[in-house]
Amino acid sequence: MSLEHLGDVKAASIAEWVSIDAVRRAIQKHFRSFLMTYVDENGQSVYGQRIKHLGEGDPFLLAFRSS
C-alpha cells in the first residue's frame, strides 16, 4: 500500500488503524525503507550500518538522533 493510500483507510482510533494488516505492513515497509536509505548531509547512511551490525549479533544498540 502506498503512503498516499494509507490516508484512505479509516478506523475508529489510531490503535485500530495500525492493527489493520495492510496498514501495519505498509508502515513497516516504509519505515524499513527510510532506515535503510536515509543519509546525512555527507551522503553517508545514518542507520544502515547500525542495522547491519544488529543483524550480525553485535550488542550495539540502535539509537535515534532527533536533530
Image (spheres, rainbow, N blue to C red):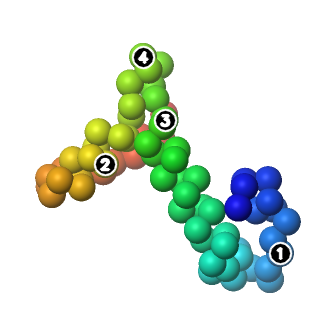
- State the mark number for residue 10: 1
Label 4: element kind: loop
The quarter of the picture where residue 2 lies is: bottom right
Left or right, 18 with respect to 35, comes to right
Q: Secondary structure at mark 1?
A: loop
Camera sees residue 4: yes
**Residue drawn at (31%, 48%) of the image:** 51
The percent position of residue 31, horizontal first and vertical second, equals 53, 53
Disc nearer the start of the sequence (2/3): 3
Name the residue beneath numbered marker 3. Answer: 38
Circle 2 residue = 51
Amino acid type at mark 1: Lys
Residue at 48%, 35% in the rendered image: 38
What's the CA distance linking mark 1 and mark 4?
Answer: 39 Å
Instruction: Examine the rendered structure and indicate whether residue 39 appears above or below residue 37.
Output: above
Mark 2 crowd level (few <14, some 14–19, many ≥20, 10 Å Cα): some
Q: Position of residue 57 (x, y in %)?
A: 15, 57
Q: Disc 3 versus disc 4: distance between alpha carbons?
A: 11 Å
Is the residue 62 above or below the residue 24 in the image? above
